[in-house]
Amino acid sequence: MNEMMLLLLCGLLAAVFLLAEVRQHNHAHEGTHHRHKIGHKHGEGFVIDMHAYASKISHWNPTFKVILAIVTLVLCIALNNPCVSLAVLIAMAYLTMVKGGLSVSEYLSVMMIPIVFILLGTLAIAIEFSYQPIGQYNLHCGFFYVYTSQDKLKEMIFLILKVFAAVSALQMMTLSTPSSEIISVMRKAHVPTLIIELMNIIYRYIFILLDVYSKMKNSADSRQGYCDFRTSCYTFGGVAGNMLIVSLKKANVYYDAMESRCYDGEMVFLEEEKKVAAGQIIAAAIFVVLLLMLWWFTK
């Protein structure tokens, strides 16, 4: 238990330091931040893509960022060490917020969805049920008991740290690398062309459907379609049915447009060449070595 408290204290101190760095960085670039403020009107996926284009590290080589994220993710899971997970969490947050220029509120907004799933999933590990008052901590709930122990709580906190760190590594990649560049990296890795084309088409088609849904919702809202619960359910069913019909029509129209532009089963886009700086490779190598050393001395 003392080890867990010490780990939490170190994480708290590191978080305070990181927040101070982010606040200082955002204050220095306050004018630029306001000019590039990003809205949330087209859904979370659109926001993430806009953050990727607006990131201050978007000019980094996409292959380098993808490899760094994957290596960090593998190390975080394979080493299974809370100190390593905490170091990865802080380092990825530093890259995303301080280097990338993303504000704390926007970063937490993007992380909120995985945070909810992680907390709900790990809570089942720490809490168990019994008809008898067992365990170090228990709560009487009528005819049964909810109980847990220090070992279960410790396991839950360590697992939360590991999953958070793994998610933060992937978020660093997605919040600084546009989807087209990630797909390009997958093409260079010789991922099957069919998968690449499906990812390209599906990802771009999502935003078309989101735009159609937004217009339908605004139209229904302007006609008092959500004035009460019963009307809201009826409106939701109507919008869902119309979305199916419109999506089929638009799919045919856009496929005809692609064929009229000589689509032969492969979508090729113009890519900007981004070179990898030697300092970035050295810094990434040092980071990986430090993670391995941290694991060795704390295992």
Image (tube, rainbow, N blue to C red):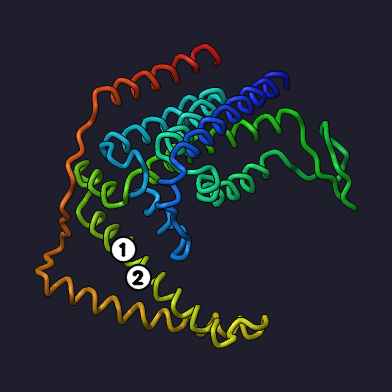
* Side of 141 where 36 appears, left or right: left
Q: Quadrant of the N terminus?
A: top right
Q: Residue furthest front?
A: 31
56 relative to 242, above or below: above
Q: Residues within 10 Å of mark 2 (few under 14, many from 20)?
A: some
Q: Quadrant of residue 69?
A: top left
Q: Position of residue 246 (x, y in %)?
A: 36, 81
Residue found 67% across the figure and 44% down from its top: 124
For the point 31% across and 42% down, the residue is: 58
Give the amino acid at mark 1.
Arg
- Residue found 60% across the figure and 50% down from its top: 116
Instruction: Say which mark, if any, is on residue 208.
Output: 2
Residue 204: mark: 1
Identify the image quadrant of residue 149.
top right
As shown in the figure, which amino acid type bears the numbered disc 2?
Answer: Ile
Residue 71: name its quadrant: top left
The percent coordinates of residue 191 (x first, y second) are 23, 47
**Mark 2 in CB contact with mark 1 (< 8 angstroms):** yes
Callout 2 secondary element: helix
Name the residue at the top extreme. Answer: 297
Up-down relation of residue 210 to residue 105 (above or below): below
* Residue 180 screen position, x and y as percent: 27, 52
